[in-house]
Image (spheres, helix red, strand yellow):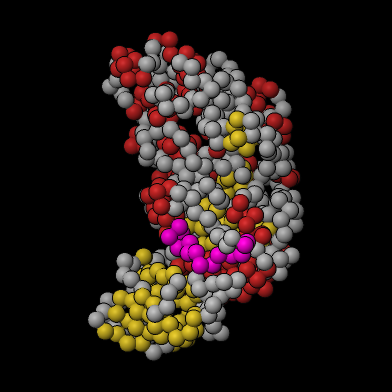
C-alpha cells in the first residue's frame, strides 16, 4: 500500500505460535519512563548523535550480496498469503515475482497464515519468490489493547492518531522501535517460510496526513517518537547553536525544552515540538510556511525520499528507520539460514537489491518534478502509443543512482488502485497487448524491468481473463533466452545519437560489459495499432568497425544478421521491418 516488555510479549504471543520454526525477536529498545500517547520513542539518538545524512552511520551489512543479474522478466501477481500458487505465475515462469503476497492488517501476522508451498513451487520452477508487507498501514485490530496501539501509532500535530477513512486505517510510526520490531517480526516469519526476499510498501507514508478524506496534507508523523528524533536531529545539524540562536532563528524558548547541551545520545530528545506548534498557532497546519521549523522537518512525496536534502523526514525515514529494518532482516537470514535475501520497496530507496517503483499519477518523474502519464490515452480513450516513456524510465534509473549511491537494477509495475491501472484496464483488448509490446521493451531499452501484470488483490481482471497469457508466455520466453537477457544487464547509456529515416521512433544507445553496442528502436507510429515501418535506415556511432550486426526483436521469428556499412565512426543498417521494437546489436 505499507518497545516496552509487555508490548513485546503481546506481539510474540499472537505472532509466533507455529508448527514450523519461527522468528525470535531481539530485545526491544528501552523506553522512557513516561508512557506515550502516540508512538513511544527510542531511548537515544542514532549512533553518533544524529543530524543530516553525513552524520548518519551506515552499517556495511545493510547492503545485500545476492546477485540480481539473472532477473530480467518480472511478473506482478499478488494474492492472499494463504492461497495456493497463482497458476499464471507457474505458466508464465518469469524470473521473479516481486510481491507474490503482502501482509495486510492481521492477514499475515502469524506463521499459520502463510501457504508456504507457494514459494517452494515457484523456486522449483526457477522463479524468485518475494513476499512482503505494508510498512505503515496500521489497523486498529492489529494492536487491540489501547496502550499497545498508542505505542506504535503515528499522530497529527495535536497528538491525535490520524484515521484514513477511505481505507479505514491509521499509520504506524517507523520512528517507534516497537513498530519497527513488529514489521521485522513479520519479515522474519516470511523468511522462515522460505521466501527469497521481501517487498515493503508505503515505507514513508507515516507523514501523509488526512483532512476530511483529503489525503496528503502532511499533518501526520508528529508523534512522540518522531519528535524526540527531530529534536536530536536539530541539535546534530546545528551543534554550535546557543539557546539565543535557537530563539532568534526559530523562536524556540526554554518552554519548548530543546536541550542541546546533553550528550550526543540524548541531546534534543525532550523537545516539545507539539507544544511549540500550539503556542504559535500552527497545530492545524504544521507545515505552514510561517513555521520556520517546517523547512527543517521537510515534506515527503511517497516512495521518493530525499535523504540528502537536509531535512528530518528526508534523512531519518530512509537512513535511520529503513536502515534498521533492512539490516536486521538481512542479519537474521544470514545468521539463521546462512543466506542472502533480496529486499526492495515501493519507490526509490537506499539499501535495496533492486528498486521496484509503482507507476501512479501525481508522481514526480517528469521534467521539473512534473507528473508522467504512464498509460497515455487519446481523447477518445484509446492507447496513445505516440507517447514515449523512455525519458521517464531514464529518470527513474538516474534517481536511483542518486539516492542509493550505487547502480542497482530498476523495476517498475502498474500500481493499484491507481489512475494508471484504471486507464490500462479501460483499453480495448488489442491495445492492452500493444501496451506491453511497446512499453516493456522501451523500459528495457533504459535497463528498467517493467512487470507484466498478472493479478492483484482488488478483484481486477487477471491476465488470463484478459486473454494476455499467450503474449506474456511468448514475451517471457523471448527475454529469458540468455542471448537476449544479456542485452539488458550491466549496460551503460551512451551519449551518441541514434538516427532513423522515419519519424516517431524512440531510441537509446547502450554499451554492454563485453563491449558490444546496442541501438534500441521503439516504434511510436501508432493509431489503435502499430503502423509497421519498413526499410528504416538507421545509423549510430561505434568506436570501431563491428565484426557483424544482428537485429533482435520479439516480432521476428529469429535473430537476424543484417548487412551494414561503417564510415566516419558510424554504423549504417537498414531495418527491413519495424513493428514494435528492434534492438540492433553491433558485435
Q: Which residue corresponds to the image point at 71% horizontal and 46% vertical from the top-left?
A: 20
Quadrant showing the C terminus:
bottom left
Q: Is residue 253 left or right of residue 429?
A: left
Magenta segment's dominant SS is loop
State the residue lying farthest toward the left.
568
Q: Is residue 488 left or right of residue 203?
A: left
Q: Observer-nearest residue: 232 or 186?
A: 232
Q: Which residue corresponds to the image point at 31% horizontal and 66% vertical from the top-left?
A: 495
Coordinates of residue 230 in the picture (x, y in percent): 44, 26
Q: Which residue corresponds to the image point at 29% horizontal and 20% vertical from the top-left?
A: 241
On the image, which quarter does residue 291 sit in? top left
Coordinates of residue 262 in the picture (x, y in percent): 37, 17
On the image, which quarter does residue 462 sit in? bottom right
Quadrant showing the N terminus:
top right
State the residue lying farthest toward the top.
255
The span shown in magenta is 380-393
Residue 99 in view here: no
Q: Observer-nearest residue: 21 or 252?
A: 252
**Number of on-image labels:** 0
523 over 36 or under it: above or below: below
Q: Is residue 38 left or right of residue 230?
A: right
State the residue lying farthest toward the bottom.
563
238 over 185 or under it: above or below: above
Q: Which residue corresponds to the image point at 57% horizontal and 62% vertical from the top-left?
A: 378
Coordinates of residue 313 in the picture (x, y in percent): 45, 34
Asked whether residue 388 is drawn in magenta, I would say yes
Residue 427 in view here: yes
On the image, which quarter does residue 166 sit in? top right
Amino acid at each position: 500500500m505499507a518497545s516496552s516488555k509487555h508490548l513485546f510479549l503481546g506481539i510474540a504471543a499472537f505472532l509466533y505460535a507455529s508448527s514450523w520454526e519461527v522468528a525470535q525477536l531481539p530485545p526491544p529498545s528501552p523506553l522512557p519512563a513516561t508512557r506515550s500517547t502516540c508512538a513511544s520513542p527510542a531511548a537515544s539518538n542514532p549512533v553518533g548523535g544524529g543530524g543530516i545524512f553525513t552524520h548518519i552511520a551506515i552499517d556495511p551489512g545493510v547492503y545485500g550480496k545476492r546477485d540480481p543479474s539473472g532477473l530480467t522478466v518480472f511478473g506482478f501477481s499478488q494474492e492472499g498469503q494463504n492461497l495456493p500458487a497463482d497458476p499464471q505465475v507457474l505458466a508464465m515462469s518469469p524470473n521473479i515475482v516481486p510481491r507474490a503476497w503482502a501482509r495486510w492488517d492481521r492477514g499475515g501476522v502469524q506463521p499459520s497464515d502463510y501457504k508456504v508451498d507457494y514459494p517452494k513451487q515457484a523456486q522449483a520452477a526457477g522463479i524468485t519468490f518475494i513476499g512482503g508487507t505494508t510498512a505503515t498501514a496500521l489497523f486498529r485490530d492489529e494492536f487491540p489493547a489501547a496502550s499497545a496501539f498508542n505505542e506504535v501509532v503515528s499522530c497529527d500535530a495535536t497528538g491525535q492518531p490520524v484515521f484514513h477513512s477511505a481505507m479505514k486505517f491509521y499509520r504506524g510510526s517507523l520512528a517507534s522501535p516497537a513498530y519497527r520490531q513488529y514489521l521485522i517480526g513479520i519479515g522474519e516469519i516470511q523468511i522462515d517460510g522460505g521466501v527469497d526476499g521481501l517487498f515493503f510498501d508505503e515505507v514513508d507514508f507515516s507523514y501523509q496526513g488526512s483532512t476530511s478524506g483529503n489525503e496528503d496534507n502532511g499533518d501526520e508523523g508528529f508523534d512522540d517518537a518522531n519528535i524526540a528524533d527531530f529534536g536530536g536531529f536539530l541539535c546534530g545539524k546545528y551543534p554550535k547553536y546557543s539557546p539565543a540562536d535557537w530563539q532568534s532563528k526559530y523562536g524556540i524558548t526554554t518552554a519548548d525544552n530543546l536541550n542541546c547541551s546533553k550528550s550526543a545520545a540524548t541531546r534534543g530528545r525532550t523537545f516539545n515540538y507539539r507544544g511549540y506548534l500550539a503556542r504559535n498557532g500552527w497545530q492545524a497546519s504544521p507545515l505552514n510556511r510561517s513555521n520556520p521549523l517546517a523547512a527543517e522537518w521537510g515534506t515527503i512525496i511517497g516512495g521518493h525520499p530525499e535523504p540528502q536534502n537536509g531535512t528530518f523526514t528526508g534523512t531519518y525515514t530512509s537512513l535511520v528507520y529503513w536502515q534498521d529494518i533492512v539490516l536486521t532482516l538481512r542479519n537474521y537470514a544470514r545468521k539463521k539460514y546462512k543466506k542472502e535475501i533480496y529486499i526492495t520497496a515501493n519507490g526509490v530507496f537506499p539499501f535495496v537489491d533492486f528498486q521496484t517503483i509503482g507507476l501512479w499519477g501525481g508522481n514526480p518523474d517528469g521534467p521539473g518534478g512534473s507528473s508522467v502519464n504512464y498509460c497515455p490515452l487519446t481523447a477518445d480513450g484509446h492507447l496513445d502509443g505516440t507517447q514515449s516513456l523512455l525519458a521517464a524510465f531514464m529518470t527513474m534509473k538516474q534517481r536511483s543512482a542518486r539516492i542509493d549511491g550505487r547502480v542497482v537494477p530498476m523495476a517498475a509495475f502498474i500500481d493499484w488502485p491507481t489512475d494508471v491501472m484504471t486507464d490500462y484496464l479501460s483499453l480495448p483488448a488489442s491495445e492492452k497487448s500493444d501496451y506491453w509490446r511497446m512499453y516493456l521493451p522501451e523500459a528495457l531499452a533504459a535497463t528498467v524491468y517493467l512487470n507484466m501484470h498478472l493479478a492483484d488483490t482488488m478483484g481486477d481482471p487477471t491476465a488470463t481473463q484478459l486473454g494476455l497469457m499467450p503474449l506474456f508466455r511468448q514475451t517471457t520466453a523471448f527475454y529469458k533466452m540468455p542471448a537476449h537477457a544479456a542485452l539488458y544487464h550491466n549496460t551503460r547509456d551512451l551519449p551518441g545519437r541514434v538516427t532513423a529515416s522515419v519519424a516517431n521512433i524512440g531510441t537509446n544507445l547502450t554499451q554492454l560489459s563485453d563491449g558490444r553496442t546496442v541501438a534500441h528502436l521503439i516504434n511510436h507510429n501508432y493509431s489503435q495499432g502499430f503502423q509497421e515501418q519498413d526499410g528504416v535506415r538507421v545509423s549510430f556511432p561505434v568506436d570501431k568497425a563491428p565484426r557483424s550486426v544482428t537485429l533482435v526483436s520479439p516480432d521476428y521469428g529469429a535473430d537476424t544478421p543484417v548487412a551494414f556499412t561503417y564510415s566516419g565512426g558510424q554504423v549504417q543498417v537498414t531495418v527491413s521491418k519495424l513493428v514494435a521494437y528492434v534492438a540492433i546489436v553491433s558485435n
